[in-house]
Image (tube, rainbow, N blue to C red):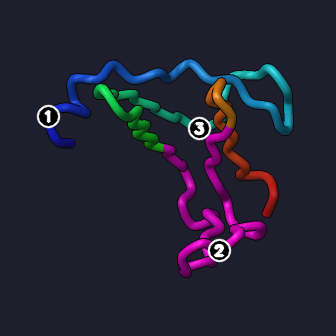
């Protein structure tokens, strides 16, 4: 990990929405945030205890990833959605 990212304190205490809303996350996730005067940078490390089941088939730019496991960031409130149960 390069120096700026290693200095950023990771957020780690996430709750799941599916299959049990509000339960502790079943897998570890770390999100780090950096910023400068023009940009916000998010670094996400999503760990998986059984990586054989990661669904990642779309390998082209601008794909819709509707059949893949995804992490999505949207809105000005920064909602982060990980969808490992869509497969």
Q: Residues within 10 Å of mark 1 (few under 14, many from 20)?
A: few
From the image, tell me which residue sits under label 3. 27
From the image, tell me which residue sits under label 1. 3
State if disc 2 and disc 3 touch (CB < 8 Å): no
Which SS class for mark 1?
A: helix
Q: CA distance from mark 3 to mark 2?
A: 26 Å
Identify the mark nearer the N-term, 3 or 2.
3
On the picture, is 8 further left or further right than 72? Answer: left
Q: Residue furthest front?
A: 38
Identify the mark nearer the N-term, 3 or 1.
1
On the picture, is 10 further left or further right than 23? Answer: left
State if disc 1 and disc 3 touch (CB < 8 Å): no
Can you tell which of label 1 and label 2 is closer to the viewer? 2
Q: Residues within 10 Å of mark 2 (few under 14, many from 20)?
A: few
Q: Residue at x 44, y 42 (%)?
A: 45
Residue 52 highlighted magenta (yes or no): yes
**Residue stretch in magenta:** 46-74
């Amino acid at each position: 990990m390069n120096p700026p990212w290693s200095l950023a304190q990771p957020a780690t205490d996430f709750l799941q929405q599916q299959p049990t809303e509000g339960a502790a996350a079943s897998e570890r996730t770390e999100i780090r945030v950096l910023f400068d005067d023009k940009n916000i940078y998010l670094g996400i490390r999503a760990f998986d205890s059984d990586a054989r089941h990661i669904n990642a088939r779309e390998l082209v730019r601008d794909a819709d990833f509707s059949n893949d496991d995804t992490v999505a960031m949207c809105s000005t409130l920064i909602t982060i959605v990980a969808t490992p149960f869509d497969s």
